[in-house]
Each structure stands twice: as structure tokens, then as C-alpha cells.
Image (spheres, coloured by chain):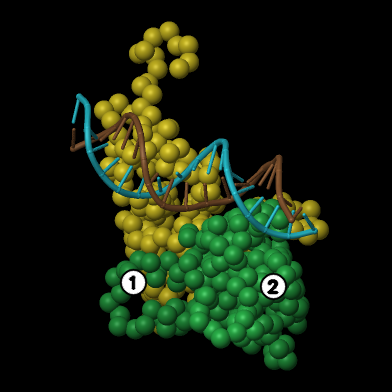
Chain colours: A green, B yellow, C cyan, D brown
Amino acid sequence: MPSSSSVWLTPPATASPGLSRAALVRAAVTRLDADGLDRFSMRRVAADLGVTVGALYWYVATKDELLELALDDVLGEAEHAPGARDWRAALVGHASALRAVLLRHPWALPLLSRLPNIGPNAMRLADAALAIAAGFSDPPAVVAALHDQVVGAVVAQAGAERGLAAPSRTATDPAERADRRFAFALDCLLDGLAARLPD
Amino acid sequence: MPSSSSVWLTPPATASPGLSRAALVRAAVTRLDADGLDRFSMRRVAADLGVTVGALYWYVATKDELLELALDDVLGEAEHAPGARDWRAALVGHASALRAVLLRHPWALPLLSRLPNIGPNAMRLADAALAIAAGFSDPPAVVAALHDQVVGAVVAQAGAERGLAAPSRTATDPAERADRRFAFALDCLLDGLAARLPD
DNA sequence: ACCTGAACACCGTTCAAGT
DNA sequence: ACCTGAACACCGTTCAAGT
């Protein structure tokens, strides 16, 4: 407890009326952002909430379920593209938003290949992308191609950051190089897609 | 012990002269293939080798180090493209070989974003791809774009297999659909790359 | 309805001690 | 040089019991 003058000036240490599923997910995301996936534990997030481990299992059946909720939660941060521009600019905006979220929450990346990822925010993102790609003959395939490019690029960037930059003889910032490469790959892919537009 | 008639008819329970780093890595890959990354533990692989957990730490400093070795080990399964064909066919062959390895060892996927992946086999694969892309103005960017497409596609396929197939109203086999989508995305990307070839 | 306390069956890692 | 045995500090999950 810090040395404040009044109780009313400091919020209670734990969420007032008790716990809630939303508060649990929020606390999990905070811990994951701070410590990463490897150090994340039910006991730690319980301690953050001023509560016993067992209490968490009232709101969540398993650790994986909590991780699934956390994953979908951060996916909600990707704002939908305004949609007023042409399909190509809209797809770039969509891909960039998703990439930004995954770069901001690196722990979400390994979860994508281990957990379902069919939460409401994931669904809304997919639907928004499908609407943009509606002009193509196979919109899901277009969205998948775009999505895969984003995920692959972020995986590579996250992995490269561990490898002590490998043999990087170039003096450029790794993040900047990753940005350039992502833009390049996206441009190539979109060119190929554009050539397949009907009409 | 099964009821065999003679010692000479059954190989010794543990690798004859003791352990070795290569044998440890081989046992780890076998366990990972059988149980997946979540259930993999040092104690389990030690039991498989007929040895105490502590013994493993003579050959490996940490669990992550063993996983790194296992990752590079399976990357060695991707045979190099023969190289006689044109660059486009060679790149497709390279991407397909990498995809096959990752589909065969799904546990390797989450490791790509959490571990360095700068082992000898990873290096050889990268060099082979760079040689194929030598005609482009920025070969590393071309290889990265291709690599990202592969990784992203496999992540999506692995994740989709957990999601109980999601709302798949199509009657097609998921694996077959994944193959088609991968071929489509790869084709689009390669078209875009071809348009950027110098000369 | 919600939370505690304590237990169960595991973990990764270390390290004296043996051979 | 290589391995055992035992310990340490953790895990996820369950569940009686309390309120």
C-alpha cells in the first residue's frame, strides 16, 4: 500500500465486487504482455488479482481456455479498415492492422497454431476481410493468402529477434527491414491477386 | 521386458555404450511427433532412453536447447531442390518441401516464433533458396516472402484442425482445401515476383 | 454463488555423490 | 567422463470446506 492520505483516493487493490471473466482476461493479457507466454502461469495472474489459483477455475475451465480468450481479446484491437477506399488499399490496411496487433502481443503468435482461434473478434476480422475481397471469385482463398503472409512475416520477425540478428551485415534497423520486406511481399501478392480479378 | 527367448534376439533397452547428443535429439523428435509439444518433457524422454533426467543435462544445457536441436533436425528432412529447372519451379519445390516438413512435425511451428532457428540445416535451406533467387535484385526479400507464405499457411492449417473445422459448409477434405489454397497463394506471389525480375 | 486451503501429480534445473 | 538420487522451486487442476 502506498502512503496515500485517504482510502477514497486509491482504488481498491482488487476489482471491487469480486472477480469477473472480463477482469480475468484483462489481467491475463497484461501479464502476457509483460512476461511472455513461457512465464505466464495461473498462479501469477491469480496473485495479480489478489486471489487464490482455485478461484480462477470458477470463470475458466482451463489455462488453454484463458489463453484462447486472451488471444481473441487482443484480436479485437485490430480496427476495421474504413472501407471507403479501393479493395487494394483496404486489404493493405487490414493486413497492416493485423500485423501491428501480432507485433504488439508476440505471445499470441504461438497460440495461433495451437488453439482454435474462432472467437467473436477473430470472426469479425475475417468477415470484414471477406467483404473487402468480395469481388474475387474465391474470397476465402484471397483472405487466407493475405492472412498467411502476415502471420508468416511476424513469425519470422519474432524468431529473428531471438537469433541475435544472425549474420546481419547491413547496418539497417531490423524492424525497419522487416517493414520493408513485408511491404514488398504484400505488393507482390496483391499484384498477383489483381491479375486474377474478374471483369 | 517382453518374453523373448534370448538376449541376442532383442536389442538392448537403452542405446548400447551410453547416451549421445544425437541419440537424445532423435529420442526427442520421436516423442514430439508422438505426443506434441505440450506433453513433451525432459523426464519423459529420459524414461524413453532408460536414464535419469539429470543425465540429459550432460548433453544439453536446457530444455529449450534440446528443442532447438530437434527443430533443426527435422529441418534437415527438407531435401534440396534438384536445381535443374527454372527458378519458378525450383522455388515451388523448395516451398513445398518446407511445407511438408512443417506439416509432418506440427510441434516445430510454435518453436519458429520462440526459438532462434539458426542451426546448420536451417542455414543450408536458406542458402539453397537464396541461390535459386539469385536472379532477383533482393534475393533475401524474395526468399523471406516465400518462406512467410509457407509458415503462415501451415499455421492456419494447424489452427483450423483444432477449430472443429469451423463453419465448413463445403464437403471437401480440409487437407485438400489447404493444398489448393497454398498453391493459389504461391501462384499469386510468384506472379508478382516474376514481374519484378530484372532484364 | 463465489472463494480458500490444501492436496495431487506433475514439471525444469541443480548438484553432491558415486563409478 | 558420465550417470544417479535427491532435492528445490515451481507448475495445472481438483475439491472439500467455508461464507
Q: Nearer the viewer, residue B37 or D3?
A: D3
| Residue drawn at 46 percent across, 43 percent down | B41
Q: Quadrant of residue B53?
A: top left
Task: Point out the image quarter for the C terminus of chain A.
Answer: bottom right
Q: Chain of mark 1?
A: A
Same chain for the residues under marks 1 and 2 in the image: yes
**Which element carries disc 1, helix, strand or loop?**
loop
Residue at the (26%, 28%) spot, across then down = B17
**Disc 2 secondary structure class:** loop
Residue B39 picture location, percent across and down: 53, 44
Asked if residue A41 is positioned above or below residue B55 in the image, the reply reads: below
Q: Nearer the viewer, residue B197 or B100?
A: B100
Residue A191, given in percent of the width and then of the height, sits at: 59, 81
Query: Can you give x and y, in whole percent of width and height, for residue A148 in the image?
Result: 58, 68
Q: Amino acid at mark 1?
A: Ala
The residue closer to the viewer here, A103 or B154, is A103
Q: Is residue C4 rendered to the left or right of residue B190? A: right
Measure the alpha-carbon separation of dots 1 and 2. Answer: 46 Å
**Disc 2 residue crowd, few under 14, some 14–19, many 20+, Cα 10 Å:** few
Q: Quadrant of residue A162?
A: bottom left
Q: Residue at x 55, y 62 (%)?
A: A47
Label 1 vs label 2, nearer the camera = 2
Q: Is residue A165 left or right of residue B74?
A: left
Residue, disc 2: A16
Q: Which amino acid does the dot numbered 2 rest on?
A: Ser
The answer to which quarter of the image holds residue B81 is bottom left
> Which residue bears the numbered disc 1?
A165
> Position of B190 compared to B199: left or right?
right
Marker disc for residue B72: none
Mark 1 or mark 2, earlier in chain: 2
* Circles 1, 2 touching at the beta carbon (< 8 Å): no
Residue at image position (38%, 60%) is B117
